[in-house]
Every structure is written in structure tokens, then in C-alpha cells.
Image (cartoon, rainbow, N blue to C red):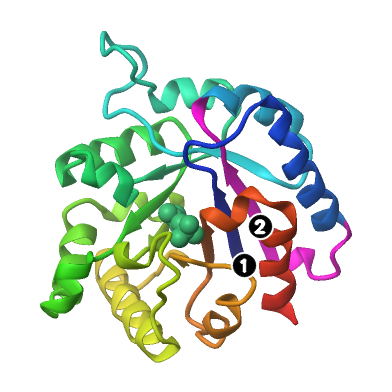
Amino acid sequence: MKYFIGNWKMFGSPKSINILKKINLFYTRDKNRKKYRIIFTPPYTLLQNYSNYFKNKKISIGSQNCYQKDKFSSNTGAISSYMIKSVGAKYTLVGHSDNRIEGDTDLMLKKKVSYAIKNNLRVVFCIGENKTEKKNKKTFQVLKKQLTNVLEKKFYNNIIVAYEPVWSIGTGEIPSSQNLKETTIYIKNILKNLFRSKTPPVIYGGSVDGLSVQSFKEVKEIDGFLVGGASKSSKKFIDIIKNYYR
Ligand code: PGA
């Protein structure tokens, strides 16, 4: 099974649902539809509305983040996995580099993943090295730490790992297919150790669009994509899927 996940970040209003309706229509008619899943993570403000609309449809809805406490608390502005689940969402991203940069630590991420899974959300756990770490050849070291500090064996059934090199997010710079292949195999080996020989899906994120996907699709180890910029247009998002299966 492949995954095509659209992460809207700080984008979208109630009427932006039209973008997802077009993608859903394509999805229901696509001859390859059984080979993949589509998940979208709109901002919190749209979760209830979109989850209701897509309840019995093909696209699944998730949140972009969740708070590191269970159920209810006195943290102003915070939203817990319990609250996300209660409005019908099925997934959540955890550990996106945008949130790591703003202070998410491994300890906080571990709590977020635990509470999300406890509340029956499936977690898309994001990891990735930044430009300096890449330059200093620290990529594998960083990825290993990000994975082993947070993931536990019991999370296995509810995790998708998203490898997103920070230097590639929103920049148009992408890893070569050879490079991506090596890194994905490395990540899968770490996961195999963590999860006692099973590996959850590992997807790639960072400047994925209809063009770049043509080089990523050579990497058979990749189980799908986390798409930022190109997920805000139905045409661009559909082009990624079309070109992937072409
Ligand atoms: P991008 O973002 O596709 O715009 O590079 C990816 C992400 O941040 O998840």
C-alpha cells in the first residue's frame, strides 16, 4: 500500500474543501485506486467540517500536530489527540520540522505519539536532517537518534514514518534517487531493529511535485509521499499520483 498525504500547513478555509472534493472524485475513479491511500491534514479549524464530509468517502483526514497531554488540560491554545479524535479525524502528524524548530523535543514527541495512539489516531512521525547536519555527514546519526528516542515496539501498528530532509522542504532541492534509496534502507533497518524485524511504511517528503515524483518513483523502498506546497492545488496533487503510476 502506498500513501499520498497532503499537509496544508497554515492554509485553508471552509471553502477550500472544493480542492479535496476534486481529488476525491479523481480517487474514486482512478484505476489504480486500490494501490494507495490519500490522507489530508488541514489546519485544526477545518478538522470537524472536513472529517464529517469525508466520513464515508475515500480521503481520510488528520491533524498536523497534537498536544503532549491526554484529553483536557489548562494549556491555552493546545489541542489534544483526544479532541482531534472526537471530531472524527483518523491521523495526526507528529514531529514535523516546523514544530521541531519551534521547540518540540524528543521527550515531547514521545508523549505526543503515545497519546495519539492511545486515542486511536494513526501517527505520521516525521524525521529528517537539516542542512548543516547533512553537510557534516551526520544524517544517519540524526535519523537514528530521532527514531530511537521516540519510537517503541508497541507503536508498530499505528505508525507511518515520514523522512523529510529539512533542506528539501519548500526549497525545490531534492535528494538523488540513489541517495534517497540508501537513506530509506538505513531507516528501514533501524525500524526493523526497533520493531523486531517488521517495518512500518516509510514515506518521503520535501519538494514532492509532479516532476520530482518521477525520480522518486525509482526508489521502490519508498511507500509514499508527504506533500506540502503541491497539496494546495487539486491539479498538482493529482499529477503526483498520475505520474507515479504512469
Ligand atoms: P513541501 O513540504 O512539499 O512544500 O516541500 C513538505 C512538508 O513540509 O511536509
Q: Is residue 114 left or right of residue 122?
A: left
Question: Residue 37, how many percent across, how many down?
Answer: 66, 57
Toward which corner of the image does residue 99 lie, by quadrant? top left
Amino acid tagged 1? Met
Question: Residue 130, how many percent across, how many down?
Answer: 22, 64
Toward which corner of the image does residue 131 lie, by quadrant? bottom left
Residues drawn in magenta? 29-44
The residue singled out by tag 2 in the image is 37
Query: Of residues 35 and 9, which is closer to you in this image?
Result: 9
Amino acid tagged 2? Arg
Reply yes or no: does residue 138 show up in magenta. Answer: no
Q: Residues within 10 Å of mark 1 (few under 14, many from 20)?
A: few
**Discs 1/2, front:** 2
Residue at image location 72% in from the left, 78% down from the top = 245
Residue 215 visible in the picture: yes
Residue at image location 75% in from the left, 58% down from the top = 235
Which residue lies most toward the top here?
74
The residue singled out by tag 1 in the image is 1
Residue at image location 58% in from the left, 76% down from the top = 213
Mark earlier in primary sequence (1, 2): 1
| Disc marking residue 119 | none
* Labelled pair 1, 2 in contact (Cβ < 8 Å): yes
Q: Quadrant of the C terminus?
A: bottom right
Give the answer, above or below, for where 191 lies relative to 76. below
Toward which corner of the image does residue 194 lie, by quadrant? bottom left
Which residue lies most toward the front here?
171
Which residue lies most toward the right here?
29
Question: Residue 140, how many percent across, how many down?
Answer: 19, 75
